[in-house]
Image (cartoon, rainbow, N blue to C red):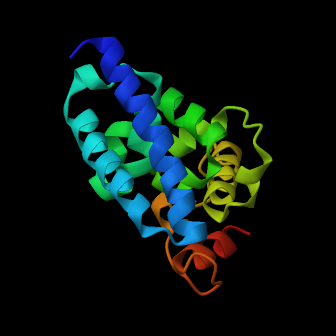
Amino acid sequence: YSSKLKDLVVEVSYALSELSKLFVEYRGLKQFGKQIEFAQTLAAKVGAEVDWQNCPSSVRLLVSFCQENKNTEKVLGDCEVAFDELEATPEIIDQIPDATLLKIVLNSVSNAMLYESPRFCSAVIFSLLKKWNKQENFFIPEFEHWVGNSSDMLDSYLGKSIVSCF
């Protein structure tokens, strides 16, 4: 296949899959599910073959289906790509790897929708506490403890660790 044809296939498939998701979700039109299945198959192919990843829409297609294809680290591991995609679609915040999210937080983020995400706010607070604690006077738990199920409870490991600092 030529690169222009690949680009066109990826761009059209991504756009149609997003439109199909809307029809399935809001109108209950199940016949549009076939396009979503095709886009998932194409996303797997794009994720597996490097020459399909040159198109700008290929990243969006992979991000759209990366949770199902289990290739989140591969797609969003690059900070610049993840930052651009996060600015465009804030709902992928939960699919971004922790290390990449912490790098993104250090850059200025202009999308206000991100500040509504508990995971993003946890990353901001964690980064600020790490900066503040340069001399390591306090014990700040690793970020993996900030995003767990019990991170919002005072008697959790995170809560006890932070309270002991003060």
Residue extending farthest bottom = 155
- The number of callouts visible is 0
Q: In the image, 73: left or right of 146? A: left
Task: Name the quadrant of the N terminus.
Answer: top left
Q: Nearer the viewer, residue 144 or 46?
A: 46
Q: Position of residue 86 (x, y in %)?
A: 60, 41
Specify whether residue 71 is in view.
Answer: no
Considering the image in quadrants, where does the C terminus appear?
bottom right
The foreground one among 38 and 101 is: 38
The structure residue drawn at horizontal position 49% and vertical position 54%, both measured from the top left corner, is 20
Who's the residue at 56% across and 37% down the image? 85
In the picture, residue 140 is in which quadrant?
A: bottom right
Q: Nearer the viewer, residue 138 or 25?
A: 25
- Residue 91 lies, with reference to residue 106, above or below; the image says below
At horizontal 34% and vertical 46% (from top left) the residue drawn is 39
Q: Position of residue 114 (x, y in %)?
A: 70, 51
Seen at 77% across and 37% down, the residue is 110
Query: How far across and how far down the image is residue 92, in percent?
Result: 54, 51
Residue 121: % across, % down: 69, 57
Q: Is residue 161 left or right of residue 77?
A: right
Regarding residue 74, the answer to whether it shows in the image is yes
